[in-house]
Amino acid sequence: MTETGGRRPRRAWIARLGPRGAVELDRAASPRAVVEDAVARVGADPVRWAIELNSVVVRRIVGEVPSLGGSPAAVELLRRGNEATTLRALFTLAEGPAAAPPTDEAILEGIHEFVHRAVPLERVLHGVRIGHAATTEAFLRACAELVDPEVAVDEVTAVSRELFSYVDDLSDTMIRAYLVEHEVWSTSAAAARADIVRSLLSDATATATDVGEASRVLGYDLRRTHEAVVVWSDTPNGNSTLQAAATEALRARGATTTLVVPVASGRLWAWGTVPREGTVPSGGSVPSGGTPRSGSWESIAEGLSRQRTQAAFGTPGGGVEGFRRSHREAQRGERIERLRREAGRVPRHATAYADVAAIALLATDLDAAGDFVRRELGGLATRTASMEALRTTLYHYIGAERSLADVARRLHVARGTVTYRVKRAQEVLGHGLDDRRFALHTALALAEELGDAVLQPNSPVRQPNSPMRQPNSPMRQPNSSVRQTNKSVSQPNRRPES
């Protein structure tokens, strides 16, 4: 993005604002044209400062009022709107209140989003107050640092007064926009459908009459068997793409009718009526030709990948209770996938709850899960590449009933490498694999899925044993001492190698 100097501001210190870290203009949430106009008006460094400040403020807002987030796309929409307010505040101080442009469309877009997600006005205003406090604090601190001490008190007072007036006007505009949109939305069919669905999900006492009437309004038979899905994307304003992705995925799962309810920018809930018996594909095997068969998890994941979306599916359930339960499972699957992403795992475009149910339940209390993993794994829970290799190998080794050939084939390494890693992992653990086997395998499974979220938070500490040594060649068998001492690997009570 082209950088040019801005016009001389009425407050000279505004031109001396700059970010504390390295901030590129391309990191802005605002459109390119908006950023270039801002640079032309106040200069590149003050705009970088505003971009950096906006990131800090948005994190604070979402941390204190989580309902204003809700999804990566919703946070991005919030970032765009708050950046617009920060730049307008910058223009107000640099050029005077009359120079600030009208309320940006990004700000109003965020207000509409909050209305559609049923975020109460008081929470929206709470977020505004948090943002105002953080932004004002940053401006006043910069003013005190950059202005001549002899006039600093007067300047800080003037800046505080102008920012207060600016935020007061902005709050009035946002309140009016919220109330107008709320009136329009509350009388729309989409709002009525969303309200019915939220009521069904929260009320376990619905009568047959209630269910029948809800089915009629929704155009969706709640007495059938349902499979729920949560679909999301990191890009805002893609709800039409999300709806198409949800419908296509549910049809592939055997759904004859679907119900789609957008709940946030870049996120929606959906259900499909599916067959009761085992006609819905579950395993998703790939034919010998290498093309995933229609309806398999692989083909569903490929379709979602093409649309740059992700989805988590619940298991099918009958009636309203199945409608609720499948939805809860889909939400748990979504949570696990988000935790995996934070841990740097390769994203899965399609997550079946049946495949992650154990991890989802174990990770309900993430802090307790982390304590469990670190206690069971000890030194294996350190965040190093060598320990990760040992954990992964040991996890698959226990799961494969100690078949060296199976693990070597799955991990694409030599059997000698598997033998070495298993022996080394036992040395780090300080006990054999038959001691607390279930707890050990469970802790390894959590570490495989959730990574850093459950591993040691501190820098790794070298174990008292010798540093990890890989075999000289991945295809070379370990030395004889390893074969003689590693009885848990070489004993014949394991499954024969295939």
Image: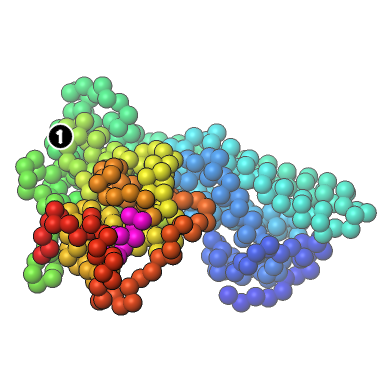
Quadrant of res 467: bottom left
Q: Is residue 17 magenta?
A: no
Query: Which sits in the foreground, 233 or 175?
Result: 233
Residue 410 shows in the view: no
Q: State whether the magenta stretch is mostly helix, strand or loop.
A: helix
Q: Return the x and y of residue 11 as percentages of the image width and height.
A: 81, 60
The region drawn magenta spans 419-427
Q: Amino acid at mark 1?
A: Gly
Q: In the rendered view, does 177 fall on the left or right side of 292? A: right
Q: Which of the 4 image quarters holds residue 292?
A: bottom left
Q: In this view of the protein, which residue sits in the foreground, 61 or 385?
A: 385
The residue at the point 49 percent across, 59 percent down is 462
Q: Residue at x 53, y 36 (%)?
A: 123
Viewer-side residue, 434 vs 121: 434
Element marked by disc 1: strand
Vertical arrangement, residue 45 with respect to residue 348, above or below: below
299 to 282, vertically: above or below: below
Q: The C terminus is located in which quarter?
A: bottom left
